[in-house]
Image (cartoon, rainbow, N blue to C red):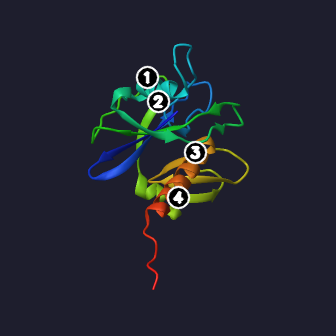
């Protein structure tokens, strides 16, 4: 799975997709581009880049790979997802969704996703789950389940990296 970052109009965004109702699992849910490994994939990064190209038209050569997040278990569908973060080299990229899997491509501003007000707890809007869960909501885009867990880890990693970049207080 690829967590694609890109610049648009001077802001950093993350691309997610809304899955169609035709896919076998996670119908209508918001997810990052990704899918199952194929025998020709050299490794899980190659799988992530290939799937991002197939699902939303991202050229693998245009991705600067930033690194991997920990694998995430989807629990309900029993997939182990291996997310990789990558920055698209071109500003203002265009995307082309694959009709069978992608109902909608959604661009989420990273600063809004990082806003603590985007993190919610409760019944997930738009889904008939009887128990409260953590989720993120930005501009009506609801990210929950495995994708929400990946977002949580991503935001924690960004916070830790940012804290390391802050200057040490001067002694005196």
Question: Between disc 4 and disc 2, whose residue precedes?
Answer: 2
Residue located beneath label 4 in the image: 160
Q: Which mark is residue 102?
A: 2
In the rendered structure, the answer to whether residue 163 lies left or right of residue 131 reads left
Contact, mark 2 vs mark 3 (Cβ under 8 Å): no
Q: Which mark is residue 54?
A: 1
Contact, mark 3 vs mark 4 (Cβ under 8 Å): no
The alpha-carbon separation of the residues under discs 2 and 3 comes to 19 Å
Q: Which corner quadrant holds the C terminus?
A: bottom left
The alpha-carbon separation of the residues under discs 4 and 2 comes to 32 Å
Residue located beneath label 3 in the image: 150
The alpha-carbon separation of the residues under discs 1 and 3 comes to 21 Å
Compared with 92, 61 (above or below) is above
Q: Position of residue 164 (x, y in %)?
A: 48, 61
Label 2 Cα neighbours within 10 Å, binned few <14 / some 14-19 / many ≥20: many
Which mark lies nearer to you, 1 or 2?
1
Label 4 Cα neighbours within 10 Å, binned few <14 / some 14-19 / many ≥20: few
Q: Position of residue 141 (x, y in %)?
A: 48, 48
Residue 6 lies in quadrant: top left
In the rendered structure, the answer to whether residue 63 lies left or right of residue 138 reads left
Residue 107 lies in quadrant: top left
The alpha-carbon separation of the residues under discs 1 and 4 comes to 32 Å
Label 1 Cα neighbours within 10 Å, binned few <14 / some 14-19 / many ≥20: some
């Amino acid at each position: 799975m690829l967590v694609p970052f890109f610049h648009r109009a001077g802001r950093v965004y993350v691309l997610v997709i809304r899955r169609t109702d035709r896919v076998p699992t996670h119908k209508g849910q918001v997810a990052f581009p990704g899918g199952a490994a194929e025998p020709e994939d050299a490794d899980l990064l190659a799988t992530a880049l290939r799937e991002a190209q197939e699902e939303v038209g991202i050229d693998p050569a245009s991705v600067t790979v930033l690194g991997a997040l920990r694998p995430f278990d989807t629990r309900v569908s029993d997939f182990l997802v291996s997310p990789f973060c990558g920055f698209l080299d071109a500003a203002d990229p265009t995307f082309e969704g694959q009709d069978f899997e992608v109902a909608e491509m959604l661009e989420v501003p990273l600063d809004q996703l990082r806003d603590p007000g985007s993190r919610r707890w409760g019944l997930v809007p738009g889904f008939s789950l009887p128990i409260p869960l953590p989720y993120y909501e930005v501009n009506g885009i609801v990210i929950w389940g495995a994708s929400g867990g990946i977002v949580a880890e991503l935001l924690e990693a960004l916070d830790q990296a940012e804290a390391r970049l802050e200057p040490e207080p001067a002694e005196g």
